[in-house]
Each structure stands twice: as structure tokens, then as C-alpha cells.
Amino acid sequence: MAEQPDDVANVLDSLTMGELIELEEYTGIPLDQLGQPGAMKGKSSVFMAHLLMRRKDPTSTIADALALTPGEMAEVLDVDPTKSTSGE
């Protein structure tokens, strides 16, 4: 797998294989491209948040994740929202 920002790698490492397959299917992005320049970060972040939210509440939907603010998203993903993911 290509090198990814720590935040993305930490979230990906916490997902099950089934969840990783769901993430690839939802985003259309192969796992080795997630977190890379040009990858759809919004779509992949929303779906990763959805997967983590669904663990705590099986009734959680993708619509719930889409309704999160960027700060709430960072909290769900347990990432530092001030940290750049572009390698800068």
C-alpha cells in the first residue's frame, strides 16, 4: 500500500476487511490511493466516519455522516483537523 498521511492510515488500520471493501466500493478509490493527492477526501472521509459511527450505533446511516460538520467529522475520525494531509 502506498504511504498515506498518519491520520488516514490510523483510520484504515482500524477498519475490518469488510469495511475496507465497502469503502472502496463507495468511493471507487483503491485502498492504496486513499489519502494520496487527487483522491476524493470528502467522500472517503464521510464513508469512514459512517463506518465508525455504525459501530457505535447500527442504525446510523450515511446521511448521518453527511450531516457532520468538519469539526464533528474530525472528532469521529479522531484526527487533528489543523494538521495538513497534503504533506505540507
Image (spheres, helix red, strand yellow):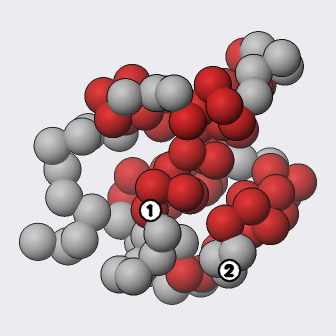
Residue 74: which quarter of the image?
A: top left
Residue 22: which quarter of the image?
A: bottom right
Q: Residue at x 84, y 19 (%)?
A: 58
Label 2: which secondary element: loop
Q: From this view, report whether residue 36 is shown above or below residue 7.
A: below
The reply to whether discs 1 and 2 touch (Cβ–Cβ < 8 Å) is: no
Determine crowd level at label 1: few under 14, some 14-19, many 20+ residues with C-alpha closer than 10 A: some
Is 59 placed left or right of 73 in the picture? right
Q: Which residue is under mark 2?
A: 30
Q: Nearer the viewer, residue 16 or 38?
A: 38
Q: Quadrant of the C terminus?
A: bottom left
| Image coordinates for residue 76, horizontal then vertical, percent | 49, 28
Q: Which mark is residue 41?
A: 1
Q: Nearer the viewer, residue 48 or 12?
A: 48
Q: From this view, report whether residue 18 is shown above or below residue 53.
A: below
Q: Residue at x 70, y 36 (%)?
A: 62
